[in-house]
Image: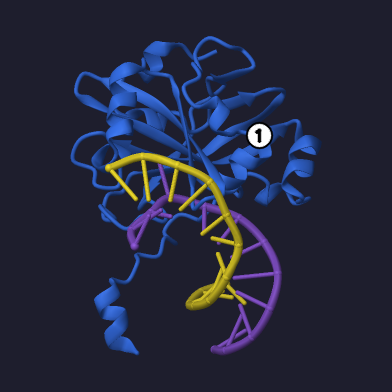
Chain colours: A blue, B yellow, C purple
Amino acid sequence: MIGREFFQRDPLTCARELIGCELRWDGCAGIVVETEAYTARGDEASHTFFRKSAREFVEKHPPGTAYVYLNYGMHWMLNVLVKHGDEEGFVLFRALEPRRGIELMRQRRGQEKLSTLCSGPGKLAQALAITGEHHGLDLCSDPERCFVPAPAPVEVLSDLRVGITKSTHLPWRFLKSGSLYASVAHGKVKVPVPPAQRARGR
DNA sequence: TCTTAGATGTGA
DNA sequence: CACATCTAAGAT
């Protein structure tokens, strides 16, 4: 089980080094193949930039704590809090390569295909039955909900983050090289077109 | 293979 | 009202 000291580093380092680790969650498990880093300072896409409650969460919890929230009214997002001095922030888990509890994950997702079982943050949370009730849980002390180190070094690629509208230029998404289980392949992120330009085009 | 619309809860 | 998404449906 990965200890708290792992999360006592900056968000980019943690996001990169979590690739290849195993995420264990109540009998299900998968290899982390896609993450994103969000920094508490200077990152307009981070919740801490526009949510007071997120800044308070960072202050009040130790590194290694789960930060779970609902997005678009229907998808739960799993993050882990990381802290290194004033370099604090979150790592968002975006995709897993399924390894254990696959039948259960298939039932929860209503999907047979392994490659799309956990290929996105909302899908991952649905497959593992992660909800707001897990917000604030310590992910460094319970063997049922924890991380396991990668058995061997993993080649990691970085890329633009997916689905955000601010700070879109930062290459803070990390992928296991060649993985077939990612949400969006390396180099395929679409940069959103600004509203003004869209209006001109029609 | 790619683009689009629509469903939906919550913080500020 | 924006939003760190997903899916089905239709166009290419």
Q: Residues within 10 Å of mark 1 (few under 14, many from 20)?
A: many
- Front one among A118 and A66: A66
Seen in the image, is A158 located left or right of residue A112?
A: left
- Front one among A200 and A28: A200
- Front one among B10 and A100: B10
Regarding residue A32, the answer to whether it shows in the image is: yes
Which quarter of the rendered picture does the C terminus of chain A lie within? bottom left
- Height in image: A98 above or below A195? above
- Front one among A147 and C8: C8
Please state the total of marks drawn on the protein image: 1
Q: Residue at x 54, y 52 (%)?
A: A183
How far from the left and from the top, in percent, is residue A170? 27, 49
Q: Residue at x 59, y 48 (%)?
A: A119
How far from the left and from the top, in percent, is residue B7? 60, 62
**What chain does mark 1 sit on?**
A
Regarding residue A179, the answer to whether it shows in the image is: no
How far from the left and from the top, in percent, is residue A2? 49, 15
Which quarter of the rendered picture does the N terminus of chain A lie within? top right
Q: Secondary structure at mark 1?
A: helix
Instruction: Residue A130: name its quadrant.
Output: top right
How far from the left and from the top, in percent, is residue A177? 49, 44
Seen in the image, is A100 located left or right of residue A131?
A: right
Q: Residue at x 46, y 22 (%)?
A: A136
- Height in image: A61 above or below A41? above
Q: Residue at x 41, y 60 (%)?
A: A189
Residue at mark 1 = A128
Seen in the image, is A5 located left or right of residue A146?
A: left
- Height in image: A132 above or below A3? below
Instruction: Residue A23: name its quadrant.
Output: top right
- Under mark 1, the amino acid is Leu
